[in-house]
């Protein structure tokens, strides 16, 4: 008999189920459609840090998650025998103007202190940067050694294999089985809508993203980031490009000329990509909480029910640490979350004239 039901087989639900099972809990995963049916079934897989500036508890939490990722994914791979496509190869960012150069130099100094010597942020001549040759107006780039890549669908397959090896069932359904002690709602966009309806608030909403997969073999190259554009080489000879960010849309699954613009932007930045075959075009809905942060914690007013949601643009990078924080809370009652992640953070603040 499972003690914990995890609702939703996206990256957050499967990662939490894995960590809970690893720590000895009896877990079952319930998925409405199929694993990866939501935002997690996409193409990009950039595990990239926030800029080392304006430091706060959330940025520290994300740093710890990115640093924990190598071990987490190695454990998943060795438990289930399926490789998730993880590699920490860094990230190159072209610096567009003098202002960007000054800021990147300040970030390099801050990273030396904030990243505790576990990763670096440097400003380099573009010609000395590893990987794909790119256009940089200043001739300079920022290069960090913290960013990593993960192949999203392989990562889910690796988690599914690891869960099978640990004896965790993944079943189809939309309601928790009877008699479980605790329920974790990790059901993405529809989960945020359900939470908002239950609490009588706007808990957040979907932000559509479109991405593409190209045939371009740069498998050991670092990823590239320019505003609005991620280029992520994968180990299988493909290169993922993302993403659009759309609050207004008609069809959540359709791709259109906005994705053509992303592909054109990538080719202008990296001329070697011009004419590369587009293997796949994909669109999905990111679960964005009203706080823009992940939401993790007890569901107010529903004893035994918990929320794990709001991955927004960083769900893959945050998954190891969110899974750990969820397990700490469920199994030990230990609360290691930054305060901004509590479910209460999405409730409207009381007006000053209210008690
Ligand atoms: C174009 C695009 C590019 C992105 N790029 C990156 C990136 O490079 N790096 C990064 O870290 N993040 C990225 N993201 C964000 C990332 O994909 C999300 O943060 C993450 O996938 C959210 O995971 P999740 O498990 O919370 O939700 P989902 O993956 O949406 O999973 C929720 C699951 O719950 C199921 N479900 C719904 N209702 C129920 C129910 N009642 N019972 C049971 N199951 C239910 C759904 O079918 C679904 O499978 C990107 C997103 C998009 C759209």
Image: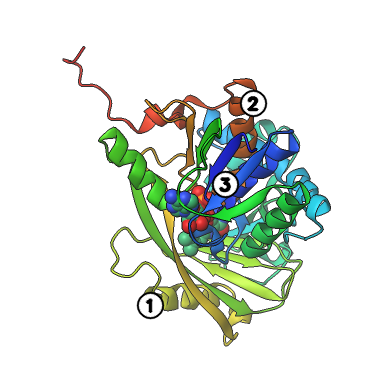
Tag 2: Cα neighbours inside 10 Å, few (<14), some, or many (≥20)?
few
Of labels 2 and 1, the one closer to you? 2
Instruction: Mark 3 or mark 1: name the one nearer the start of the chain.
Output: 3
Instruction: Mark 2 or mark 1: name the one nearer the start of the chain.
Output: 1
Q: Is residue 3 above or below residue 130?
A: above
**CB of residue at label 3: within 8 Å of ligand 1?**
yes
**Residue 331 got which mark?**
2
In the image, 109: left or right of 219? left
**Residue nearest the observer in this picture, 180 or 206:** 180
**Residue 256 got which mark?**
1
| Tag 2 secondary structure | helix
Tag 3: Cα neighbours inside 10 Å, few (<14), some, or many (≥20)?
many
Pointers 3 and 1 in contact (C-beta within 8 Å): no
The location of residue 77, given as percent across then percent down, is: 79, 54
Q: Can you say which quadrant of the picture contains the C terminus?
A: top left
Taking the view exactly as shown, the residue that stands out farthest to the top is 355
Q: Can you say which quadrant of the picture contains the N terminus?
A: top right
Q: Is residue 163 above or below residue 52?
A: below
**Residue 13 got which mark?**
3
**Residue nearest the observer in this picture, 12 or 133:** 12
Q: CA distance from mark 3 to mark 1?
A: 30 Å
């Amino acid at each position: 008999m499972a003690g914990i039901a995890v609702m939703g087989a996206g990256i957050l639900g499967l990662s939490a189920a894995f960590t809970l099972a690893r720590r000895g809990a009896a877990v079952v995963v319930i998925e409405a459609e199929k694993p990866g049916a939501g935002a997690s079934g996409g193409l990009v897989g950039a595990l990239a840090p926030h800029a080392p500036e304006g430091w706060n508890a959330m940025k520290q939490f994300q740093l710890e998650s990115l640093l924990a990722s190598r071990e987490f994914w190695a454990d998943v791979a060795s438990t289930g025998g399926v490789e998730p496509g993880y590699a920490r190869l860094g990230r190159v960012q072209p610096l567009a103007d003098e202002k960007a150069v000054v800021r990147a130099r300040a970030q390099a100094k801050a990273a030396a202190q904030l990243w505790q010597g576990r990763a670096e942020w440097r400003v380099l001549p573009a010609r000395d940067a590893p990987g794909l040759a790119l256009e940089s107006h200043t001739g300079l780039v920022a290069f960090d050694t913290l960013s990593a890549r993960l192949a999203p669908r392989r990562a889910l397959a690796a988690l599914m294999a690891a869960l099978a090896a640990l004896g965790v069932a993944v079943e189809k359904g939309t309601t928790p089985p009877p008699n479980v002690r605790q329920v974790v709602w990790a059901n993405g966009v529809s989960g945020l809508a359900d939470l908002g309806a239950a609490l009588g608030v706007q808990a957040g909403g979907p932000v559509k993203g479109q991405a593409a997969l190209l045939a371009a073999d740069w498998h050991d190259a670092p990823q590239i980031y320019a505003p609005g554009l991620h280029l992520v080489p994968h180990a299988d000879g493909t290169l993922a490009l993302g993403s659009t960010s759309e609050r207004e849309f008609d069809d959540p699954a359709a791709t259109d000329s906005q994705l053509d613009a992303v592909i054109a932007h990538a080719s202008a930045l990296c001329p070697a990509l011009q004419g590369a075959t587009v293997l796949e075009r994909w669109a999905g809905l990111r679960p964005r909480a009203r706080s823009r942060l992940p939401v993790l914690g007890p569901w107010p007013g529903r004893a035994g029910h918990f929320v794990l949601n709001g991955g927004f643009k960083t769900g893959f990078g945050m998954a190891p640490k969110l899974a750990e924080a969820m397990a700490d809370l469920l199994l030990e009652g230990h609360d290691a979350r930054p305060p901004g992640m509590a479910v209460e953070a999405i409730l409207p603040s009381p007006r000053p004239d209210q008690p």
